Amino acid sequence: MAEKTGTEVMTNFIYSMIKEDLEKGVLGDKRVHTRFPPEPNGYLHIGHARAIILNYRLAKIFNGKFNLRFDDTNPIKEEQEFVDSIMEDIRWLGADWEDRLFFSSDYFEVKYEFAIRLIHAGRAYVCDLSQEEIREYRGTLTEPGKESPYRNRIVDENLDLFERMRKGEFETGSRVLRAKIDMASGNLNMRDPVLYRILHTTHHRTGDKWCIYPMYDFDHPFSDAHEGITHSLCSIEYTDHRPLYDWIVDNALELYPEAVKFRSRQTEFARLNLTYTVMSKRKLRRLVEEKFVEGWDDPRMPTIAGMRRRGFTPASIADFQERVGVSRADSTADLALREHCIRQELEASAPRLMAVLDPIKVVITNWPAGKTELVETENIPGDENAGTRKVPFSGVIYIERGDFMEDPPKKFFRLAPAREVRLKGAYIIQCDDVIKDAEGNIIELRCSYDPRTKSGADTSGKKVKGVIHWVSAEHAAWIKVNLYDNLFTIENPEEERDLDFTNNINPQSLVVCENIPAEPAVVEATPGSRFQFLRKGYFYYDPAAASVSKPVFNRVVPLKDSWAKAKQKS
RNA sequence: UGGGGCGUGGCCAAGCGGCAAGGCACGGGAUUUUGGUUCCCGCACUCGCAGGUUCGAAUCCUGCCGCCCCAGCCA
């Protein structure tokens, strides 16, 4: 399959920028070095997948390196559980950090030293203002802030106080370390940003060793420079933070050069939105907590874990990301593009199987009693190497209810009274009789088959337009099938401001079919494998549900259906 | 009323002064034992708007308009 090896050419502005840096020799003898910096406080979604793939592929293309670094500077929100799930997701996507798994907390000691040097240089100070006071002093969007009364503390006092902050002499929230920059800046991030806060909280890795923790704006640029990251990619809302990023890196370079491997630079790109889904962590959490879905890995979720369980492949997600592209403009990618990517891959790689999702019984009246015939059919049409398989055919079969119409419109090519249709790989049958129950529901079809029309050896000269799938009742294997559809009924559920977004949840987003007849070959399938259920869509044998008595298949995506579309229009 | 970012077809997105790539979606046709796939063909006289510079502008200049982000001791 078209697996992304990372060697193809990219055509986005970040790729161009790096190429130019290389040509101009900006990197010296250093190789391109990127990183993915998740905070271990939740599950990764398709937007993160985009960042992971971008960073990883960029490193690959330029023969550089890719780090995984957890941004674990806030012990209140972070947990080991998320570290594990994030690593699993990234590994699954195929992004390999080799031996470069880092944690921001690995560098707490060096960062502390850097803070000391900032204080020595008179560029950072301990501030005793309360949280509310700091906010007041910061000013507003349109008015400048005013300087903290502690701003001009002497170096020795700052040093002493900061050391005692580390020792745990002060309460949580009582003091902070701030950078001394510019309280009048139009950019609020430059109004003496907080560098360290006191948090008497156990950290998932450093335990109780620290009670002061660095802020993102201090930590991130330094960690990048310290690891030798050349290109620090992040999302667009950090654009405002870039001057501060540069301030930190420049100061590190000046005051603590031995701790800096490279003068890293930040480049921002737009986050990804998807139609018919929500992406904010808060909303995803609500979906899980309020049980609108079954968990973070529910196949309807845009999480990496959810897509994995739905049956998407890493290659299809990488393909999707590549096709969407990268830019700085706000954008919402069409879900149809993601569907296109997985269909394209599975069309060529998924073996076909027959299963009837909405069965109706068909009795073939002229079939010899008790006879079973094995008919042969291709596993993947057009791919000789995929071979063929034998499917048992007999006198009682199931077909889709929707493949029969009692009173069909002119263009209906399937089964109808006195009309003929081909059973895929088997014979042409004609419908002779329609059996109904007391309420008038069709419960059975009586058909006759034409022995001359055996698939591949047809001597009848008949031409039928319709070919439908079927399953022999006597030989059927019974499976459970989950049919998934968009979680929301409107294109942009994020934008709905008057109504709670959960009001737009699609009540049909999951349709469970408990008892579905499938051709017997399905029992030989391995959990984790993917099939096309002929004419119905691509399905994934859910390994997470493998312990259940019956195999469970999740529909990744239905096949395109131009008949249904035409019907809808009329 | 401060600072930053963005505006190219329904959705993405190339383009960076020489006369609008590509993908998805959509519409039409051919092939087809999946109404799938594949294959043709069509789909922006126009680049948020208005001026200007130029032989020539989506690309340069000026002025508007619209949308997004920022006042966490979150990341």
Image: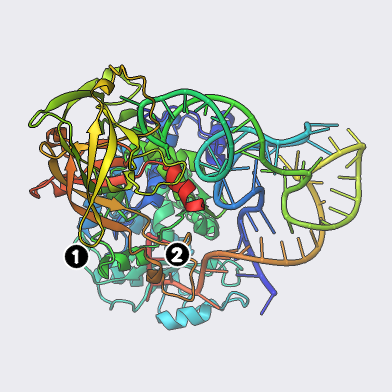
Q: Is residue A259 visible?
A: no
In depth, the one of A134 and B36 nearer the eye is: B36
Is disc 2 in contact with disc 1, using a CB cutoff of under 8 Å?
A: no
- Chain on which label 2 sits: A
Q: Which residue type carries mark 1? A: Asp
Choose between B63 and A32: the one closer to the eye. Answer: B63
Residue visible at 34% across and 48% down? A406
Q: Label 1 lies in what chain?
A: A
Q: Residue type at mark 2?
A: Pro
Q: Is residue A367 left or right of residue A536?
A: left
Q: Quadrant of the N terminus of chain A?
A: top left
Q: SS of the residue at dot 2?
A: loop
Q: Real-space Cα distance between discs 2 and 1?
A: 42 Å
Residue A527 location, x and y as percent? 16, 39
Give the numbered dot on residue A493.
Answer: 2
Disc 1: which residue: A208
Q: Position of residue A202 (x, y in %)?
A: 20, 66
Crowd around label 1: few <14 · some 14–19 · many ≥20 (10 Å)? few
What sort of colour scheme is used for the picture? rainbow
